[in-house]
Amino acid sequence: MREERPYPAPPEYDIFKRRVRELTGLDLDAYKYQIHRRVHMLMQRWNMHSYDQFYDYISKDPEKLREFLDYLTINVSEFFRNPVRWWHLKDVVIPELVDLRKSKKLRFLSAGAATGEEPYSLAMLANEANLDDSQPIDAWDIDVNALKKAMDGVYHQRQLVNVPKEWLPRYFEPKGKELYQIKDMLKRRVRFSVKDLIKDPFPEEWYDLILCRNVVIYFSPEAKSKLYRKFYTALRPGGYLMAGTTEHIFEYKEIGFISPGAFLYRRPM
């Protein structure tokens, strides 16, 4: 859903957006007002006087480009966001995968892990299903600062509103006023990595389940298509991809997926 607000931007900004899209695959038309405001604030912080100057600055310095992408990322999350989808994973998808593989050793990926709520939610489901903990869940994001928070594993209680009450003492320890710390036994189930989903190669090993939710809203149609095809190739036959609530894959049949449920896509056997 695109944000409808007054959007006073000069024509040069349209050229800047196009160049950023060509460089990174990022579509700055998503959430126009909020993204434009962030771009403008970063230009002021770095003392940039034009969009041309700003583009040259970030395109020639990989570290500044990563900082730019980090700053634009809007991380708003909680554990078990959209709970119905998570309980479907718990009650249907994971048991089905265990039965299909005849093994409790499954490979999961959280693509766009942000500050960790999603991969830790997945880790709780893995633990509840008694999955083999020798295979950590891969959790990738391009935002270095977000991943640092994820590895720290400290969250406000409002982010835990969807966690079943009986699970709280199992997976969290109180840490000061209204804060909770992820227990080490759950941390060990997750492996965080800095990764650009579009540009970086995926591992050769297949995944049984990939979560990519509320990530591709920032991507151009071309980047989305490229990423979904990478996910398809990365899935073991019979494996699942779960997308975000607003992220329909309209070309899923062309890619090769079947769709057994809303926002759920599967690589056929």
Image (tube, helix red, strand yellow):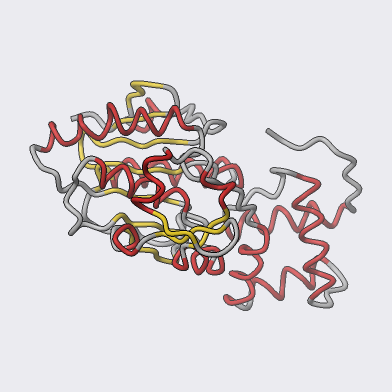
Q: Nearer the viewer, residue 59 or 100?
A: 100
Q: Nearer the viewer, residue 65 or 22?
A: 65
At 69% from the left edge and 43% from the top edge, which residue is drawn? 30
Q: Quadrant of residue 145?
A: bottom right
Residue 217 in the image: above or below residue 153: above
At 46% from the left edge and 61% from the top edge, which residue is drawn? 181
Quadrant in the picture for the C terminus:
top left
At 55% from the left edge and 59% from the top edge, which residue is drawn? 179
Q: Is residue 44 left or right of residue 175?
A: right
Number of numbered labels in the structure image: 0
Residue 115, percent from left and from top: 52, 58
Q: Nearer the viewer, residue 205 or 14?
A: 205
At 30% from the left edge and 30% from the top edge, which residue is drawn? 266
Q: Is residue 36 left or right of residue 8?
A: left
Q: Is residue 225 left or right of residue 8?
A: left
Residue 139, percent from left and from top: 39, 57
Residue 115 in the image: above or below residue 209: below
Q: Nearer the viewer, residue 135 or 31?
A: 135
Residue 259, percent from left and from top: 36, 23
Residue 201, percent from left and from top: 36, 60
